[in-house]
Amino acid sequence: MQDKEIEKRNTRRLKIYGVRDGQGPLTPQLRMQGKWLADCGFLPGGHVEVNCSEGMLVIRRTKSVSVLVAGSRSITAFDLSPYIPSDCGLIISGGAKGIDTVAERYAAAHGIESRVFKPDYARFGKAAPLKRNDEMVEQADMVLAIWDGKSRGTKHTIDYAAKIGKEVKVITVTAE
């Protein structure tokens, strides 16, 4: 979309409000709305950078991190909070029971987009789960593996992520 086209379509959709924080003075708050925001990549939960210089307010999307949360099915409860980066915009999981379910719940509770990759057995047969794991690793910026020390699928994911140069954080836990 060209800058002039965006500017022309959106000149009437910008409002500035005075917002009072407690008993303090009014603080200006800029509000924008409309489908054009999503068209330009400004999505709910997305991160932005705001700069003001030379009489112009510039708002840029910042890259959010996609995190693959992978792990053993035997781990059904785990606090992901200390391990998910604050700029996480997408949590990827494999849709299995265990840590994948924990990751999906975490994403929903924190307003983070989640994407579930299911194995394609029709296409890959018995190799489908490992192919799916490789695809998830390739789509993620980093891998957080919550591992019971036994799961071969999680071990494969950890090894593949390291092999292709992804950031990998492995948390080894004892299953419940």
Image (cartoon, grey):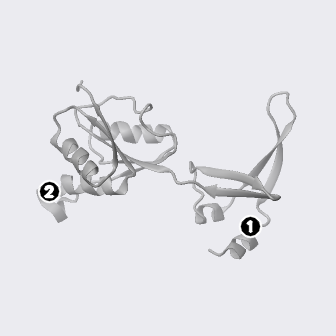
- Using the rendered view, name the quadrant where residue 146 is placed: top left
Where does the N terminus fall, quadrant-wise? Answer: bottom right
Above or below residue 96? Residue 121 is below
Position of residue 82 in the picture relative to residue 98 (left or right): right
Q: How many neighbours does mark 2 have within 10 angstroms: few (below 14), some (14-19), or many (20 or more)?
A: few
Question: Which tag, 2 or 1, sits closer to the chain's start?
Answer: 1
User: The residue tagged with tag 1: helix, strand or loop?
Assistant: helix
- Using the rendered view, name the quadrant where residue 24 is placed: top right
Above or below residue 125? Residue 20 is above
Residue 128 x %, y %: 18, 56
Q: Which of 76 and 131 is in front in this view?
A: 131
User: The residue tagged with tag 2: helix, strand or loop?
Assistant: helix
Q: Residue at x 56, y 51 (%)?
A: 46
Residue 93 x %, y %: 33, 47
Circle 2: residue type: Ala
Position of residue 63 in the picture relative to residue 97 (left or right): right
Where does the C terminus fall, quadrant-wise? Answer: top left
Task: Return the residue at label 1.
Answer: 10
Q: Which residue is drawn at 64% across and 51% down?
A: 49
Q: Residue 142 carries which label?
A: none
Q: Residue 127 carries which label?
A: 2
Q: Which residue is drawn at 69% across and 51% down?
A: 50
Q: Nearer the viewer, residue 171 or 43?
A: 171
